[in-house]
Each structure stands twice: as structure tokens, then as C-alpha cells.
Amino acid sequence: MLAQNKKARHEYFIEDKYEAGISLVGTEVKSCRMGKANLREAYVQIKNGEAYVQNMNISPYEKGNIMNRDPLRTRKLLLHKKEIAKLLGLVSQKGYTLIPLNMYLKHGKVKLEIGVARGKHTYDKRRDIKDREVKRDMERRMKG
């Protein structure tokens, strides 16, 4: 696991998940391996039949030189045309968005897990917090 978007599961209901490759340069991959990636404010946008991730912060590699790129640059996602068409259909529905959930290594390649998400209301968030507290309290009682 290189990076995780913990805020996503609190802010959204995750309906479906997809795995996508991501187009990075060498210094960005090295920086990701060092744990310098941040997915907190990132989102996925589909333009001209291609998927791009926006606002994903990959800090510059410390030992890199002129090969370092802009940390917040737009990066292309590697998906099949059918997957992009399906995601575009889901996003065109009211209230759905695409957000990156996790970034990880798979067979030496950097992969991004994308979630089709629907936003939560404040009462949904409160209910989740209450359920978590009840579960934690039950575990304490069972242990004690």
C-alpha cells in the first residue's frame, strides 16, 4: 500500500471499485515508493474518452533533478475503453463521482483503486459514527 484515501470512506458511499494503472514518470514512482503520495483531495475526471486523476499530490523526489515534475499535475489513468464508457455512464447519473481510494504496487506497477461514490449527508455520517461506537463498546464488554 503506497497511499490511502481515508477521508473517502467517511465522506462517500462507495458503490463500485475499479483498478486502473497510472501513467507516472520514474521520479514519481520513486517518490510513491517512499510514501510521499497524497490522495486526500484527488478526484477522477473523464475527458475526450480518457480518464485523468486531478489534484493527486506526489511530492518531488529528493534525489531527483530536472526530471522532477509538478506535484499536482494531471495524470492519465490506464483503463480499457469499455471501462471508461461504463464509468462515464455511472458518473453522468446525478450524485455520483469518481474518487481514488488506494494506491498500491502490483507486480512492480503502480495501480490506483477508483471508487464510484455517492456523497453522504451529515446524518449518514453521524449514523456511521454511532454504529462504530456501539461496536467498540460491545467488543470492550465481551473482552472484559
Image: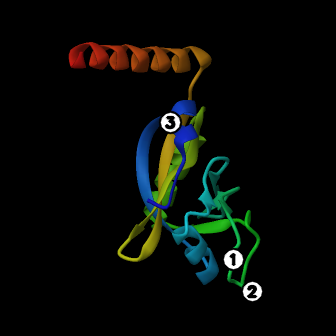
Q: Foreground residue, 95 or 24? A: 24
What distance separates the C-alpha of mark 3 from that of mark 1?
Answer: 31 Å
Q: Nearer the viewer, residue 132 or 141?
A: 141
Q: Quadrant of the N terminus?
A: bottom left
Of the pair 113 and 138, the residue shown nearer to us: 138
Q: Which of pointers 1 and 2 indicates the residue nearer the eye? A: 1
User: Percent from the top left, x then y, of residue 26?
Assistant: 59, 82
Crowdedness near tag 1: few (<14), some (14–19) or many (≥20) residues, C-alpha within 10 Å: few
Mark 2 belongs to which amino acid?
Asn
Task: Give the quarter of the image for residue 74.
Answer: bottom right
How far apart are the two marked residues, 1 and 2, measured between alpha carbons? 8 Å
Q: Which residue is mark 2?
A: 65
Q: What percent of the width, then of the height, locates residue 47? A: 67, 60
Query: How far separated are the C-alphas under marks 2 and 3?
Result: 36 Å
- Relative to the observer, which residue lies in front, 53 or 85? 53
Q: What residue does disc 3 label?
A: 9
For image coordinates 35% across by 75% down, the residue present is 107
Task: Tell whether label 3 touches label 2 (CB within 8 Å).
Answer: no
Q: Nearer the viewer, mark 3 or mark 1?
A: 1
Q: Residue at x 54, y 47 (%)?
A: 5
Horizontal side of residue 102 vs 141, given as left or right:
right
Numbered circle sitting on residue 62:
1
Three-letter code, disc 3: Arg
| Residue 36 against residue 9 in the figure, above or below | below
The residue type indicated by label 1 comes to Glu
Q: Which secondary structure, mark 1?
A: loop
Q: Which residue: 67% across, 47% down?
A: 41
Residue at the farthest front position: 144
For numbered disc 2, what is the local secondary structure? Answer: loop
Disc 2 crowd rating (10 Å Cα; few below 14, some 14-19, many 20+) is: few
Query: Horizontal placement of 9 versus 49: left or right?
Result: left
